[in-house]
């Protein structure tokens, strides 16, 4: 019989080279993600925002920026454990081990401005024009959506800024983003108190639109002023109107849609019913009224636009990655508005860096849709690379990297048509009451039928402009008597 004892006693020695910045700058890195957020970029935004340290000590500002970003990669641990992960791979180097207070002071000294500038540099469309799933014809599809479910620490300073929901819940911050639906990469973001409203926040991102984009939005953005502002950017749009909207019918089109006008903007309206058949034979329907600037029914048939509108839900997947995959539903750790701003900009920067690595990887395989890349795999690989201080300054020119290789090794299957129950097992849910007829479990869709409503009534004449309103007289109130 062969002797396996000698083989079992064999030892394999593995050595590796770690290349990082020198001296007190060594802890400042994000592992492989440092190639997307390089030292030169961090130094540039620090100089631009005037936040470079006055004197070079043990914790320079560059290290502080990387610490804030790493803090969002590891939201489940405290400051000192985040620092421990940043220096875990620096074996043999003499590095400082600061106290928790020292790291808090470092965060405060860096502030939110350089982290915001960092995100604004990374933000933007990620995919090449030929990448599958990112365009509708010649237009890059993007979407607006807001998120009001991100909770913050329940402190007096946070409540003073954000207000507080009824009951004993946490103060919530509203996040508004413009997302490339094909990659879920972010083009821009704003956030603040929920009282300001979605259209107000979205209007602050309109400068990011251009004539090569097709913007999607849901009925929460049904506003004449917002639609007019979007049209003024030169971008095309496809949005949902509320069911009680009644627009003038200027001309009926062969595909069942009709031409109309909304606040002096020429539009096309599509009324459609979508019937979904699930794997358990359950069927349910939804009624949609869509408005679009794409007015040619031959180039853009109504049923194609109804199918395209479903891509707006890619935005929800982006928010799921932020709130659940990265944060695991945790509240933001910062106890004051300045800290919240810094933390949110850092979270968005880390998210965008991960999406960038994922898109770069999928584009090395022509024909691969970016939505097949697993955000969870990319996130966990990035965490491992940071802990090992791996590929901080890579010696080779492999653009895919360990994150890309991990993503490509376990690509998700092509997207299936599925339906969600939109219900959680909790007495307090952000969803409305479960609608009748909808399945009680997530189901595979076996058939999807779109019916375009073609009303044969005579077209309505365009509305006559209403006269300007007279200024309202001030209300007089009686003086209070003692």
Image: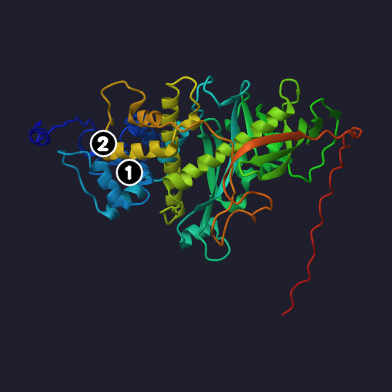
> Depth check: 217 or 112 in front?
217
Which part of the image, by quadrant, shows the N terminus? top left
Q: In terms of secondary structure, where does tag 2 sit?
A: loop
* Alpha carbon distance from label 1 to label 2: 13 Å
The circle on residue 370 is: none
Between marks 1 and 2 in the image, the one whose residue lies nearer the viewer: 2
Q: In the orientation shown, which residue stands out farthest toward the bottom?
A: 482
Residue underneath mark 2? 389
> Depth check: 447 or 181 in front?
447
Q: Residue at x 67, y 40 (%)?
A: 276
Figure quadrant of residue 271: top right
Q: Residue at x 45, y 23 (%)?
A: 363
Figure quadrant of residue 64: top left
The circle on residue 67 is: 1
Q: Residue at x 19, y 29 (%)?
A: 17
Going from N to C along the chain, the mark reached first, 1 or 2, is 1
| 294 vs 98: above or below | above
> Residue 197: x percent and y percent?
63, 48
């Amino acid at each position: 019989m062969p002797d396996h004892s000698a083989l079992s006693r064999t030892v394999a020695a593995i050595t590796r080279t770690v290349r990082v910045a020198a001296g007190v700058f060594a802890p400042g890195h994000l592992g492989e993600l440092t190639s997307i957020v390089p030292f030169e970029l961090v130094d540039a935004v620090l100089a631009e925002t005037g936040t470079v340290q006055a004197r070079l000590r043990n914790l320079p500002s560059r290290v502080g920026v990387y610490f804030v970003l790493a803090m969002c990669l590891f939201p489940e641990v405290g400051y000192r454990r985040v620092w421990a992960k940043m220096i875990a791979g620096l074996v043999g180097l003499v590095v400082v081990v600061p106290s928790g207070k020292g790291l808090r002071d470092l965060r405060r000294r860096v502030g939110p401005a350089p982290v915001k500038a960092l995100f604004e540099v990374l933000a933007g469309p990620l995919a090449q024009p030929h990448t599958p799933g990112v365009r509708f014809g010649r237009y890059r599809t993007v979407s607006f959506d807001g998120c009001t479910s991100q909770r913050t620490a329940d402190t007096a300073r946070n409540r003073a800024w954000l207000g507080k929901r009824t009951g004993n819940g946490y103060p919530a911050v509203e996040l508004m983003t413009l997302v490339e639906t094909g990659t879920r990469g972010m083009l821009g973001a704003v956030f603040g108190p929920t009282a300001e409203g979605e259209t107000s926040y979205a209007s602050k991102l309109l400068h990011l639109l251009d004539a090569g984009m097709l913007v999607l939005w849901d009925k929460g953005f049904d506003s004449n002023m917002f639609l007019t502002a979007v049209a003024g950017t030169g971008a095309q749009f496809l949005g949902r109107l509320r069911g009680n909207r009644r627009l003038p019918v200027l001309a009926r089109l062969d595909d069942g849609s009709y031409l109309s006008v909304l606040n002096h903007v020429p539009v096309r309206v599509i009324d459609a019913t979508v019937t979904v058949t699930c794997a358990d034979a359950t069927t349910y329907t939804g009624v949609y009224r869509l408005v679009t600037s794409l007015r040619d029914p031959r180039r853009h048939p109504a049923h194609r636009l109804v199918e395209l509108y479903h891509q707006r839900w890619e935005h929800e997947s982006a928010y799921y990655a932020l709130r659940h995959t990265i944060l695991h539903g945790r509240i933001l750790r910062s106890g004051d508005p300045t800290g919240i701003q810094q933390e949110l900009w850092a979270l968005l920067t880390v998210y965008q860096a991960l999406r960038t690595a994922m898109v770069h990887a999928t584009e090395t395989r022509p024909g691969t849709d970016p939505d097949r890349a697993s955000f969870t795999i990319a996130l966990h690989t990035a965490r491992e690379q940071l802990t090992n201080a791996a590929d901080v300054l890579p010696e080779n020119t492999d653009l895919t990297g360990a994150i890309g290789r991990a993503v490509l090794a376990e690509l998700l299957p092509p997207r299936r048509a599925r339906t969600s129950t939109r219900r959680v097992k909790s007495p307090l849910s952000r969803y409305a009451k479960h609608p009748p007829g909808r399945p009680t479990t997530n189901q595979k869709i076996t058939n999807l039928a779109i019916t375009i409503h073609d009303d044969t009534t005579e077209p309505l004449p365009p509305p006559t402009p209403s006269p300007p309103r007279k200024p309202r007289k001030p209300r007089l109130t009686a003086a209070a008597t003692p």
